Image (spheres, rainbow, N blue to C red):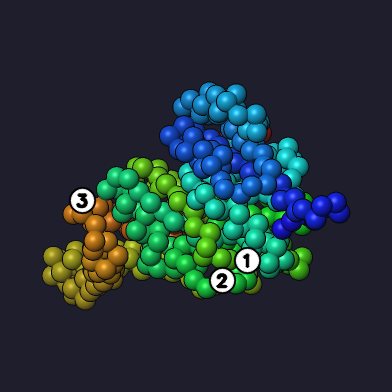
Amino acid sequence: MTENSSAGGTAELIGVSYVMPVLNDVTHVKAAVMSLLEQDYAGPFEVAIAVGPSIDGTNELVDELSRADSRIRVLANPVGSTPAGLNIAIRATTYPVVVRVDAHSVLPRDYARIAVEAITRTGADNVGGIMDAQGTTAFERAVARAYGSKVGLGGTPHHVGGAEGPADTVYLGVFRREPLERVGMFDERIKRGQDWELNRRIRAAGGVVWFTPELRVTYRPRPRLSALARQFFSTGMWRGELTRRFPSANTLRYFAPPVMVLGVTVGILLGVIGIVQAALGGSAILALGWAVPAVYALLVIAAMLVVARRDGVRSQLWFLVVLPCIHFCWGVGFVLGFLSLASNISALKNERSGGTSVGSVG
């Protein structure tokens, strides 16, 4: 996307605004910001970081980065949620192309250049690519394997890749500012899944969301099992909420984890009852319920042998824990969200915190 000047026939590259919400991400945010400063895109750019009320030194770190480079601007995000931070950063910037950045992501040097070229070539309102999860520890590598496999997150193109073309949603996103603002930017009532919901509105307004595998962003997974469980419980809960709100725009794959959770739970309960009945001299037929969790356990082991076969033993063992954690936390969260509890829980948090909701960013 260029603007040709009338004098001299030169072309001026369009400006790019990088927008990043941050909350308690002192470990990753510097790498994310540095990946923006090191882009090989030759056009002008600005960086807007919306910082939530962090307690781990994030505020001090981003302030230091801002003092070192005048193109970086730090903004307060008192609500602390991802969509609120994104909207604050978007409103504070001016360039025609808006690049969403995650504090856990590292953009390759050619990211902005490829994205702007794709927007120009396709006329899309939003362009994005693949979330390429990469871990540094055995646990993180196991999480990354789960992210990038069909058995983990369902095999959507922005996780496992695919052919270039129109898509329902993409990872992060590089937007034309005008249509982004016209559809109302991010819905701040939706704490997770806000990318999918925004892309739904863009497509409903006649716009195009474009996937290209050339855009591959390094993503750093959560470093601990507890953090991973919280992430996927929240993600599942909001996915359930969005599925309830927009049933025609969803596919059956969203129901796979909750059905699996229900099946395994019922199987265990029936199995326990069958064992008790057998111990009391009755029929043990219900003990066959143990077949359901047994089959699931075999599927997890098979997935480990296929997906994580090239990893070390520690990472393979972690995979046996990580995959059920993702499935069960997401599935339980989905059920609660589908029962409309996601918005109720968010409202309760707002009430307790005096009108603010501090959520995780990522």
Residue 275 to residue 87: above or below:
below
In the image, what residue type sits under mark 1?
Trp
Q: Which residue is mark 2?
A: 164
Q: For numbered disc 1, what is the local secondary structure?
A: strand
Is residue 244 among the parts visible in the rendering? no
Indicate the quadrant where residue 259 lies.
bottom left
Q: Which residue is located at x 43 percent, y 62 percent?
A: 153
Q: Which residue is mark 1?
A: 210
Q: Earlier in the sequence, mark 1 or mark 3?
A: 1
Residue picked out by circle 3: 314
Q: Is residue 219 above or below residue 23?
A: below
Disc 2 vs disc 1: Cβ atoms closer than 8 Å? yes
Q: Residue at x 24, y 61 (%)?
A: 310
Q: Earlier in the sequence, mark 2 or mark 1?
A: 2
Q: CA distance from mark 2 to mark 1?
A: 7 Å
Q: In screen coordinates, is 197 left or right of 336?
A: right
Tag 2 secondary structure: loop
**Amino acid type indicated by mark 3:** Arg
Q: Earlier in the sequence, mark 2 or mark 3?
A: 2
Please name which of the two marks, 1 or 3, marks the residue nearer to the observer.
Answer: 1
From the top left corner, tell me how far across and down residue 50 is, in percent: 62, 35
Eye-nearest disc, 2 or 3: 2
